[in-house]
Amino acid sequence: MSYVVVATYVARSGEADAIAAALQRITPLARAEPACREYRAHRSLEDPNLFLIYEEYHDEAGFDAHCATEHFACHIRDECWPRLAQRTVVRAQPLHTPPSAALFADPNRGDG
């Protein structure tokens, strides 16, 4: 079962572009982590100060490993967080396996 984290960031006035740049820098680094299944950062079309980050890992330990990386410390903790007016985080598990994952799941791995 996957471990999902959805974060919303609201930038302080004048800080949104710096946050967008930091999120663009961390995305390929996070995606290269062994436990990362998905890492996608989004910017709201209605409010350019609002960001949504969708992350999916093999398990909670994978997310914890992500949070312990140098690139998380640099781009998220040190670059993004000080520029935020607000941050929310929701940790979740999918209610079901997506159909596409079920089609390609290895029955011996126990993840599908």
Image (cartoon, grey):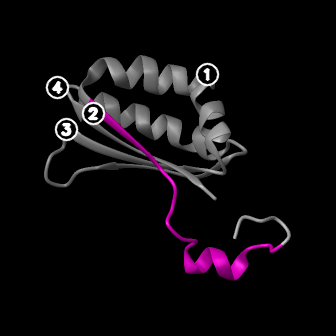
- Tell me the crowding category of disc 1: few under 14, some 14 to 19, or many 20 or more residues within 10 angstroms, Cα based: few
Task: Label 3: state its secondary structure.
Answer: loop
The residue beneath circle 3 is 49
Amino acid beneath label 2: Asp
**Which residue lies under the disc numbered 1?**
70
Disc 4: CA contacts within 10 A as few (<14), some (14-19) or many (>=20): few
For label 1, the SS is helix
Q: Which numbered circle lies on residue 14?
A: 4
**CB-based contact (under 8 Å), mark 1 and mark 2:** no
Answer yes or no: do the residues labelled 3 and 4 have beta carbons within 8 Å?
Answer: no
Q: Give the numbered dot on residue 32.
A: none
Which amino acid type is shown beneath numbered disc 1? Glu
Q: Is residue 77 above or below residue 62?
A: above
Left or right: 37 as drawn, with respect to 24: right
Q: Which residue is mark 2?
A: 17
Of residue 31 and residue 97, the one placed in the foreground of this image is 97
x and y, in percent, of residue 107 in the image: 81, 74
Which quadrant of the structure image shows residue 86? top left
Q: Earlier in the sequence, mark 2 or mark 3?
A: 2
Of marks 1 and 4, the one in the foreground: 1
